Amino acid sequence: MDKERIARELIGIVGSDGVATDPGELRVYETDGLTIFKAMPDIVVLPRSAEQVAGVVKVCHRERIPFVARGAGTGLSGGALPVDGGILIGLNRMNRVLDIDYENQRAVVEPGLVNVWLTNALAPRGYYYSPDPASQTACSIGGNVAENSGGPRTPKYGVTTNHVLGLEVVLPDGDIVNFGGRTLDPLGYDLTGIFVGSEGTFGIATKVIVRIMRTPEAVKTLMGVFETIEDASNTVSEIVGQGIVPAAIEMMDNNSIQAVEKGVAAGYPLDAVAVLLVEVDGPKEEVEALVGPIIEVCKANHVREVRVAKDENERLLLWKGRKAAFAAMGQISPEYYVQDSVIPRTKLPPVMKLIGELSQKYGLRVANVFHAGDGNLHPLILYNSANEGELRKAEEMGAEIVKACVEMGGSLTGEHGIGLEKRDFMPLMFNDDDLEAMRKIKKVFDPDGLLNPGKIFPAAMRGGEVGPAGQREALDKVLRRA
Amino acid sequence: MAVQPTGKITASAFDQIDPPDAELQLDCVHCGFCLPTCPTYLVLGNEMDSPRGRIYLIRAASEGKIGISDNFVRHMNLCLLCRACETACPSGVKFGFLMESARGQIERHYQYSAADRRFKHLILRTFTDPRRLRAVTGLLSFYQRSGLQKLVRASGTLRLFGRLGKMEALLPAIPDKRRRKDLPEVVPAKGEKRGRVGLLVGCVQRFFFADVNSATARVLSENGYDVVVPRDQGCCGSLLVHEGEREQAKALARRTIDVFERAHVDLVVVNAAGCGSVMKEYWELLHTEPAYAQRAETFSKKVRDVSQLLAQAPLNGRLRALKRVVTYHDACHLAHGQKVRQEPRTILKAIPGLQFVELRESDDCCGSAGIYNLLYPELARQFLDRKIERIKETGAEVVVSGNPGCSLQIEKGLKERGLNVRVVHPVELLDWSYHGTEG
């Protein structure tokens, strides 16, 4: 591509402060929340409106330049990396709340809006936006739409797709279209449904219509301190088994506790093997009535200590700890590689045992954080790429964890997406026909394959090209062992 | 020298005189939590002007992947060094240290235009040398009192002076000569003695806000402290650290340590957030100097913001009612730099009759940021405008700030909008309350 000519044309669309071409500056955009992968764009464009996005996309389409959208750069599957180079469209400047309709519980926002900013805007009137990924103070709603992000509140309130009603989308040819609308049940095909979770491969959302909800009358958060992972896991199963639907059940192991306590001092005991956070919300009487039975279940499972947050500050601090868990890893390790597998809840103890064994085998520490309510694991493999061969070991270990989780009836990813990171794992879950069906849908949206190339589909479907950072090698090794 | 995974050896863009610490760079896990808290990222909207992006650039330069180019320097210099990112960072990245040493490298290796260099040095040399500042304040006082200021402002001549003209707008009313008079060398404690403390009188504080220093001495004395004001103290070097002039800053730091060691004080009290922050971090600035490393560590541990000292026990003496609506601006170098947030609020709330209203986004930078408002007035203006809007919302008659830079900046913003709101230091309010009169 004629970089200079294209850059001039892009400057004409977004202005000179919205285009970067200096390789020194572009480097800043070569990675996101998962630093194990890196890919430099040729040009970064920072539009301020849907029209500007469409203008940029039209240039890409005309010139056959690959392009990818990026929100806050907090992604954990390399989903927004420009693996084929080309143009990276950063949406962080489109970060406004456009409209709030309290009576009908809808809000219209731009994709670059930071997730928690929406709740901050709604809170004074007693409303909130439910999907709350741990990175909610930083991640963007557009990115949440792409990855169909979850968060602690998922067990009771569902993931992003359950809260998105409609979208304005720039298609890969530059047309601006609308999917869904302001009602829960859209007319015709549920294109909003198919778009949410498409990992930035179908189009670029430029407006998102979301559901907003009333802040519950009461919330109670409990912290249970356990001496074994089994006790904590059994507690989770029994709480759910009793028909209690907590808003959130989260678990952290000792390594996570160490990092969190150093980073934000949330008040978790440093000697705990596992900490469980359980939150219930709803009408006051209901919430009060649920606290007792939950404490009983904890006690039946040998809890060492149960603490009910006595006020809002203490409650927020307990959550701050959990939500900062990944971000605090710098306290105990220079780098981490996080997995996102899902397992049936009952398999938690054997999977934890296996992860412990793998940690021994590879000589790498692992910190575990999970959405225990829905069996979504986040083992953070701690490594230091400055140590010869450690990065490769981390990748190999990650692959072993993923494979084991799938074999136990789980899945590759709960919420971080397939992206670049797990594309070659897809055959573990889908056969050729399944994958071909997905590819046909991708072709409907993006016949030229220009938008976010190199994601989701495994090597064979990409013409056998080799993945980044020797990942294929690590994966092949693990898969061959099967 | 850094070794890349390819085995290729690349020279770092930095030299070996305290370069940005490699270990500190590794603390950043690239999570992005800092982005929405960074004032320049929010205004400029590109990641090169965010904490995470700046660390990434510093790391790339350390590893020799990029050089100290115009763009690199711009992104480093546009940082306010407000350190809001440090408050947001769960991994405890010491962003301030990284940025300060990166600027040290820039000072040595980057060729600024002659005009830029002259301008910056003029400001730094003036503000960090009490003798020069004394002379300048004398002239400025004459300029204001003689009616010349009114004349000049009306004439529009200031426009001809470019950036210096903009500086003029920042000028507060210079206290008259009587009030600029130096404090006695010792202000003895009243009542039961709690300790002997040294007071840093600062540069800007001493000449532009002399009342703050005398109020500090009176209030500390009222609360049982002997206040020692060493005559031979100079500038603490804070602005120089901020601007990357580390060698000069180190010289000033060494001198400050010497002076207060000779004064034999239990603690060193500071009433300017920027100075206090840097003095609490002398241990880092001087850690490579064998003769001073240990002494700097001991010194840093003795430094307290005046509000910390006053908030640790109930206040002595009789406080009279001050019927005022007051709000508090968190200076970056108190809230983010020193993690001092509650103490100033505690002492304000101890004043009877005073109605305290919280300021929204109280710990957002006001744009003063050392000499940032002089170097980048257009950008600084945007941060100031937002701050003034928030102050207006509170309906306060008095804004309290623990840093002279912030006070100058906020006063300017208020004056321009014709708002009748006073800007004072927390100890001034206490002093008024003790004496039943407003200064």
Image (cartoon, coloured by chain):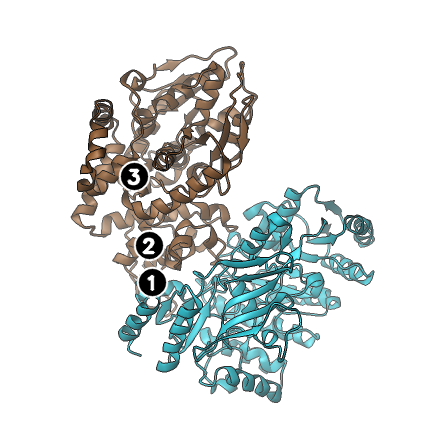
Chain colours: A cyan, B brown
Three-letter code for the amino acid on which mark 2 is drawn: His
A345 relative position to A442: left or right: right
Tell me the number on the disc at residue A180. Answer: none
Residue B164 image offset from top left, x and y in percent: 22, 39
Q: Quadrant of the N terminus of chain B?
A: bottom left
Tag nearer the camera, 3 or 1 = 1
> Residue sitting at 64 percent across and 74 percent down?
A186
Residue B177 image offset from top left, x and y in percent: 27, 18
Q: Distance of mark 2 from mark 1, alpha carbons?
A: 9 Å
Tag nearer the camera, 3 or 2 = 2
A457 relative position to A29: left or right: right
Residue at mark 1:
A25
Residue at mark 3:
B240
Q: Distance of mark 3 from mark 2, alpha carbons?
A: 19 Å
Q: Quadrant of the C terminus of chain B?
A: top left
Report which quarter residue B288 is drawn in. top left
Q: Residue furthest top?
A: B191
